[in-house]
Amino acid sequence: MPSRKSDPPQGSGPDPTSVPAESGEPPRWRRRKDARPQEIVAAAMDVFAERGFAATRLEEVAARAGVSKGTLYLYFPSKEELFKAVIRAAILPNLQQAEALVASAGGPCFPVLERLLRMVARLIATTRMAVIPRLVIAEAGNFPELAAFYHREVIRRGFGVLGGLLRRGMESGEFRQMAIDPSVRLIVAPLLMSAVWRTSFDGVDGESPLDVTALVEMHIGNLRRVLLGDAQPQTGPAAVGEDAP
């Protein structure tokens, strides 16, 4: 006699991964698929930090993310595009936060500058984001398109935030008059040095970890003396231009 197909166990139902949940959440396979780009970017951040951009192979990133190389290519068609995604994920949200802080802040400008510098110090000291400037600097000559992307998406916007804050402080008379562009670069320089140093020399040949917080606090103290020392109200349009004394 032909075998009789057994009845499903009592209380059994459809595979919960094959139908949407009644709560309105997507099924588990859909949630896993939606999370893959973020998982790939997180894995890429780790591999880029360990091996550098040029030495990183996409097979390594895919293995670290637990996906096939073909799956990785569905989301990121090249290593350059994946690196851009890492920059967007690691830096741009913090840059947007800085832009929002400056845009919404009222009152004196120096406390806002202090908050910005301490925020960057914390990111440099506690996250892997600090490795990105070093990677870009190291590979800029071989990958100028990546350098241009970083300049456009990060440097230009970051300089714009600081430049706007300095201009506002000078116009109100809180800050002394100065050339904005070199002033912005001088404000950024210790932060960039801290990021490069921490990701290049910490632990090398017995080198103690850089105390980023202490360095930035000293930087803030120096800026307080420079920016606030002889502040005078603005007397003309040229006072905030690039040729101001």
Image: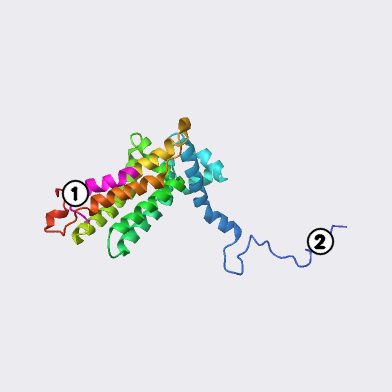
Q: Are marks 1 and 2 in contact (CB under 8 Å)?
A: no
> Quick check: is 24 in the magenta stretch?
no
Vertical placement of residue 197 versus 225, above or below: above
Residue flagged by tag 2: what amino acid is it?
A: Ser
Between circles 1 and 2, the one closer to the viewer is 1
Q: Give the prevailing secondary structure in the magenta stretch.
A: helix
Residue name at image x 35 percent, y 40 percent: 193
Numbered disc total: 2
- Please give the label number shown on residue 6: 2
Q: In the image, residue 157 lies at what x, y percent?
A: 30, 52
Q: Earlier in the sequence, mark 1 or mark 2?
A: 2
**Secondary element at tag 2:** loop
Vertical placement of residue 35 versus 55, above or below: below
Query: 124 and 219: which one is in front?
Result: 219
Residue ID for mark 1 = 179
Determine crowd level at label 2: few under 14, some 14-19, many 20+ residues with C-alpha closer than 10 A: few
Residue name at image x 49 percent, y 45 percent: 73
Query: 185 and 155: which one is in front?
Result: 185
Residue flagged by tag 1: what amino acid is it?
A: Ala
Farthest residue toward the right? Answer: 1
Residue name at image x 43 percent, y 39 percent: 199
**Secondary element at tag 1:** loop
Determine crowd level at label 1: few under 14, some 14-19, many 20+ residues with C-alpha closer than 10 A: some
Answer whether residue 152 is visible to the viewer in this image. no
Vertical placement of residue 5 versus 91, above or below: below
Q: In the image, residue 74 lies at what x, y percent?
A: 49, 48
**Quarter of image, res 233:** bottom left
User: Marks 1 and 2, how far apart in space?
Assistant: 84 Å
Q: In the image, residue 226 lies at what x, y percent?
A: 24, 49
Q: Give the magenta range.
A: 175-190
Residue name at image x 43 percent, y 51 percent: 89
